[in-house]
């Protein structure tokens, strides 16, 4: 009998970093990015060799059967197109950076690259994307025993010891920390132009319930009865025994969309003014022009403003969805969702 997967939830806490610690973390994120790109590149290289194998070309055209799957798995292992082969590939590459990247974090980087490649080779994705500079914003471990660890309200990672901010009145965090920590993840976010670091704890169990501090009652009690949900691209219809509503999804994002359009037009004007040699007379981009783009200080400033606005939009959208979900669970305990092809 197969074992059922244990439930997990995430607790995000802010790190109290010093400047020298931020420099080390920034260096480690950059190393992780290069390791990720190397693994992804190697996956594509090995898969290309596999595709040129005549036996593979014959097997792949056969009808689905157990023998076909067994032979394909043998070919995947022979050419090293497996997740564990990527673990072996990243091992010698990590060695020069062993003071910064531990073996468990390296394996997770290899797994992350493999999952991205898997969507291309065996899923519905059409392409894979390599990480550009400063685009690798998370690194995680495999357990809370070695590598990236959370012990005594401290993040420990290869010589780094960074205190984690846990407020005394944060009852939710204190209750959550009583559960077993599966593994840890370090996040990097740019907020108002500054880099902030966070620690995500993947905890085993069910998230603790939130209580009203004044009354002591559960903030979002689970209701009773059936609830019908019809989700659209911009709206959601909810029907229960006590209430029927048609709501707009993420209503607080609409006001920010206007600001986003203004910034996008401003960016386009600045880009054209700085790079007239990159455009044709009709306003289209010259495809044969290989010269570098010129970015002015004002352009970079506007681009950072747009990035901050998009971050706010993502946070507001997530907050609106969470508030909506909390309201829906108060209506019933059996949810029936209309299927939709996006």
Image: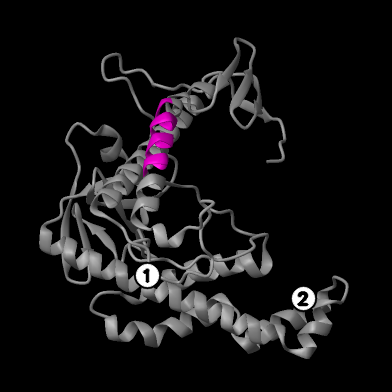
**Which residue is painted at 64% across and 82% down in the image?**
48
Q: Is residue 266 above or below residue 283?
A: above
Most foreground residue, 52 or 162: 52
- Using a 10 Å C-alpha cutoff, classify the residue at mark 2 as few (fewer than 14 neighbours), some (14 to 19) or many (20 or more): few
Residue under label 1 = 33
Query: Left or right: where does residue 168 sit relative to residue 8?
Result: left
Most foreground residue, 286 or 174: 286
Q: Quadrant of the C terminus?
A: top right
Mark 1–mark 2 CB contact (< 8 Å):
no
> Which picture quadrant has residue 170?
top left
**Mark sitting on residue 69:** 2
Q: Quadrant of the N terminus?
A: bottom right
Most foreground residue, 160 or 18: 18
> Which circle, 1 or 2, is nearer the viewer?
1
> Which picture quadrant has residue 141?
bottom left
- The span shown in magenta is 255-266
Q: Secondary structure at mark 1?
A: helix
**Residue 168 percent across, percent down from the top left:** 17, 35
Direction right: furthest residue: 63
Query: Left or right: where does residue 57 sit relative to residue 10?
Result: right
**Residue 156 percent across, percent down from the top left:** 21, 63
Q: Indicate which disc, 1 or 2, sits on the residue closer to the N terminus.
A: 1
**Which residue is painted at 53% across and 71% down in the image?**
114
Direction top: furthest residue: 242
**Residue 215 percent across, percent down from the top left:** 30, 14
């Amino acid at each position: 009998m197969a074992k059922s997967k244990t439930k997990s939830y995430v607790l995000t806490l802010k790190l109290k970093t010093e400047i020298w610690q931020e420099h080390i973390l920034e260096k480690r994120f950059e190393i992780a990015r290069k390791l990720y790109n190397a693994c992804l590149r190697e996956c594509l290289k090995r898969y290309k060799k596999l595709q040129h194998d005549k036996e593979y070309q014959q097997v792949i055209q056969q009808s689905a059967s157990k023998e076909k799957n067994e032979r394909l798995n043998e070919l995947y292992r022979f050419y090293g197109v497996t997740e564990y082969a990527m673990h072996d590939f990243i091992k010698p590459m990590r060695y020069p950076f062993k003071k910064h990247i531990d073996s468990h974090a390296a394996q997770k980087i290899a797994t992350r690259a493999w999952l991205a490649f898997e969507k291309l080779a065996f899923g519905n994705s059409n392409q894979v994307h390599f990480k550009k500079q400063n685009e690798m914003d998370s690194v995680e471990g495999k357990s809370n025993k070695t590598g990236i660890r959370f012990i005594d309200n401290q993040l420990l990672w290869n010589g780094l010891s960074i205190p984690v901010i846990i407020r005394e009145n944060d009852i939710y965090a204190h209750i959550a920390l009583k559960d077993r920590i599966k593994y840890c993840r370090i996040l990097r976010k740019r907020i108002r132009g500054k880099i902030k670091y966070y620690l995500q704890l993947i905890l085993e169990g069910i998230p603790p319930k939130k209580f009203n501090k004044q009354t002591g009652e559960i903030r979002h009690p689970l209701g009773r009865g059936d609830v019908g949900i019809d989700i659209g691209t911009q709206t959601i219809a909810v029907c229960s025994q006590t209430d029927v509503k048609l709501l707009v999804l993420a209503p607080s994002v609409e006001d920010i969309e206007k600001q986003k359009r203004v910034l996008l037009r401003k960016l386009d004007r600045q880009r054209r003014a700085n790079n007239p040699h990159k455009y044709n007379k009709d306003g289209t981009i010259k495809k044969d022009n290989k010269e570098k783009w010129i970015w002015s200080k004002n352009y970079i400033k506007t681009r950072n403003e747009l990035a901050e606005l998009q971050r706010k939009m993502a946070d507001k959208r997530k907050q609106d969805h969470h508030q909506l979900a909390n309201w829906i669970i108060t209506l019933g305990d059996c949810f029936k969702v209309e299927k939709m092809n996006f």
